[in-house]
Amino acid sequence: MTTKTLFTISSIMILLIGLAWILMPRILLSAWGLEATDALIYMSQRFAAAVLGFAVILWLAGTSYKSDPRRAIVGGVFAVSTLVLILSLYGVLSNLISAWGWGAVIGEALLSLGFGYFLFIKREPTA
């Protein structure tokens, strides 16, 4: 797999997640076993807006040339996906969220592994 492929797959996956949280937060919150209060729906949609911006960054980075800023994006995505993975694991293992959270754990683990691979193991040249 190339970084371009990883960026493309990740951006599409994250775009779909962001759209789902913008358009149907009540359904997703319920599936995760959370009470869909107006405040939580609002915060979920705000989070989703940031996620959609993240998808755009990934898409554009995937179509850009290999550079130090692109490498910085790889590092940032690794950091974000690893931190969110830890939070999702905590949520599932502590029963704060339902078993649906395991889907997030798997997706976040794959992102973390993919971007970690290109950050630490198969570093792309930046020129």
Image (cartoon, grey):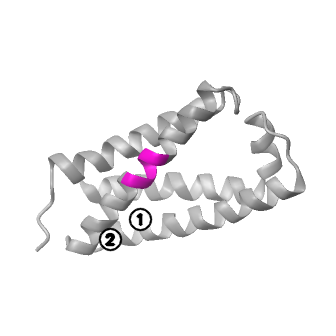
Looking at the picture, which amino acid does disc 2 mark? Thr
Q: Residue at x 84, y 58 (%)?
A: 39
Q: Residues within 10 Å of mark 2 (few under 14, many from 20)?
A: few
The residue that label 1 is drawn on is 58
Residue 81 belongs to the span the image colors magenta: yes
Q: Residue at x 69, y 53 (%)?
A: 20
Is residue 63 in view from this perspective?
Answer: yes
x, y (%) of residue 12? 49, 56
The residue that label 2 is drawn on is 63
Looking at the picture, which amino acid does disc 1 mark? Leu
Residue 49 tag number: none
Element carrying mark 1: helix
Q: Residues within 10 Å of mark 1 (few under 14, many from 20)?
A: many
| Marks 1, 2: nearer the viewer | 1
The residue range painted magenta reads 79-83
Classify 127 as above or below 117.
below
Classify 119 as above or below 96.
below
